[in-house]
Image (cartoon, grey):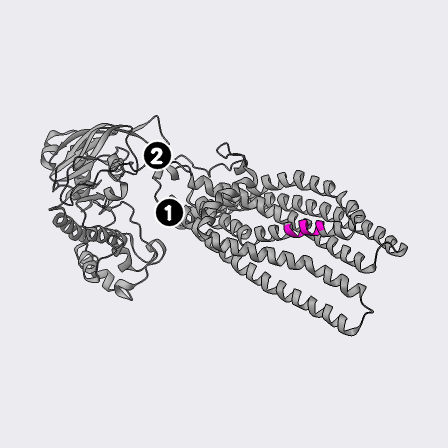
Amino acid sequence: MAQTSSPALPASPAASPDRAPSRRVAALAALWPFVRPYRTTAVLALIALVLTAAVSLVLPLAVRRVVDNFGAAEVLLDRYFAGALVIVGLLAVGTALRYYLVTRLGERVVADIRRAVFDRMIGMSPAVFERLMTGEVLSRITTDTTLILSVLGSSISVALRNALIFLGGMVLLIATSAKLTGLVLLLVPAVIVPIVILGRRVRRLSRENQDWIAASSGAASETLLAAPTVQAFTAEQATRDRFADLTERSFDSARRRIAVRAVMTAIVIFLIFSGVVGVLWVGARDVASGSMTIGQLVQFVIYAIMVAGAVGSLTEVWGEVQRAAGATERLLELLALEDSVRDPDRPRPAPSPSAVEVRLEGVTFRYPSRPDQAALHGVDLVVRPGETVALVGPSGSGKSTVIQLLQRFWDPQEGRITLGGVDLRDMQREDLRRQIALVPQEPVIFADTARANIRFGRPDATDEEVETAARAAAAHDFLSALPQGYDTYVGERGVMLSGGQKQRIAIARAILRDAPLLLLDEATSALDAESERAVQQAVDQLARTRTTLIVAHRLATVKRADRIVVMEGGRIVAEGTHDALVAQGGLYARLARLQFTEGLAAE
């Protein structure tokens, strides 16, 4: 028996050839369409931000007045202190208002981004998810949007405020002492150089770190969803090792990013405050010589500290902005994904909601992941209105591919498929799928109540209609026996239910859907003999007024079909009734002989 191994880990997600190079912080401009609907809030936040910056710049002027007039009359001194308190009050109110508006704006925009990405991904065809793991998409929707929230709800506001303080502080520094300001400006090139050089590396490491986090999230999601299988094959340690490796790689890239940012911060702070110490030494000598008052020096020092603090804060914020730029790029990749299956610009209306004809004309299809191997070869098939047709054949013969093409999850490379005479590519996918009720081979059960899972087929259905559908699917008895009946929570992926019970809920959902085209993909594969008989009777009743296509391996479930189509190697090799195909010999007769002989032997 061939052994399988865990997929090889990539050298670095960030180095993947599919990744576009970072577009730097310019990528953040792509957030504007999400901000634009709330520009009034953004303008009010900007006004509050300018107000707080202006008030902050006025405060050192009040301090200078107090220092230079410390020996003045008590009444004058009281006025200066009262003025300082008014300024502080304005600063407090403005800061609170800025925080509220900016944080609210950030939360609103990020909520819209998450919704836009989810809306985009939920409508993507399976081709997209052949190369993109679900866990990575979830990581981008959660981790990356959290980074963007940090920037929109805090960092950009802090950056703008500090930029205003820096510019205003520089003007007031020059007004206070042009000589000392000239000495301060000599430091600017020395501060900017490490920001630019080390900032590029921080940006690259931030993107790499985010990619490793997404990779580990994808691995965790895939493994946790398959936890029983992992445990059944005693592969817990192998999966632990794989996840630990991904987590360590993520940590390693984060450690390198943090180290670079720490070095950048240390260099900038050292240069800035060393310069401040030097300027203070010169200023102290000017005070001693009488060319400058103590109040002017105190005012200059406060402005110098404010400017230095603004520059230091900008270096911190710059790293966050770069991380958010990387996150924005990754989200934009999802929003910009091209789907091979698209709705037409001028869609044709779907056929009338009665039994419809299905027609495949010369259909050839290859999965994108296997372009050299055709899943279907020039298939021609007609299913007449109200007819029940069964597709049988060995695994890999193309049966389920036909079901997927009918739902337009893919488009054939050659030929066409029509529903009621309308090419599927000429209809909107949503209109097409409203005509279809599906019972998949692996039923999907949501983490909700049994009633909600059945009603998923038709959200506006009444409780009575839900229960009628459950009775028709032979599900009413076991649902009524649950602790809260139909309103029992069935757990994630229906863990509280058996395989057969999940299948019957899926059948009830399809019955409730009440669509003109019924697709049954191994619909009774998980049922016991008694339940299968009951469900088969319900399906037979349901199929009388519908066009029905059944995929089955168990031939006992398709014996009563109007026509059986035998597939092998992506081609139709025979068709007819059960008795006619058995009489012809060939593949169907061989399958029938194997199944029915084994069944009799088992009895």
- As helix, strand or loop, the secondary structure at mark 1 comes to helix
* Direction from residue 332 to residue 263 in the image, left or right: right
Exactly how many numbered labels are in the figure? 2
Numbered circle sitting on residue 340: 2
Looking at the image, tell me whether mark 1 or mark 2 is earlier in sequence order.
1
Q: Quadrant of residue 357?
A: top left
Q: Is residue 520 magenta?
A: no
* Direction from residue 181 to residue 346 in the image, left or right: left
- Observer-nearest of 303 and 490: 303
Q: Which residue is mark 1?
A: 119
The percent position of residue 450, horizontal first and vertical second, equals 28, 59
- Observer-nearest of 522 and 529: 522
The percent position of residue 477, horizontal first and vertical second, equals 20, 61
Q: CA distance from mark 1 to mark 2?
A: 17 Å
Q: Amino acid at mark 1?
A: Asp
Q: Amino acid at mark 2?
A: Ser
Residue stretch rendered in magenta on the structure: 164-171
Q: Is residue 166 magenta?
A: yes
Regarding residue 594, the answer to whether it shows in the image is no
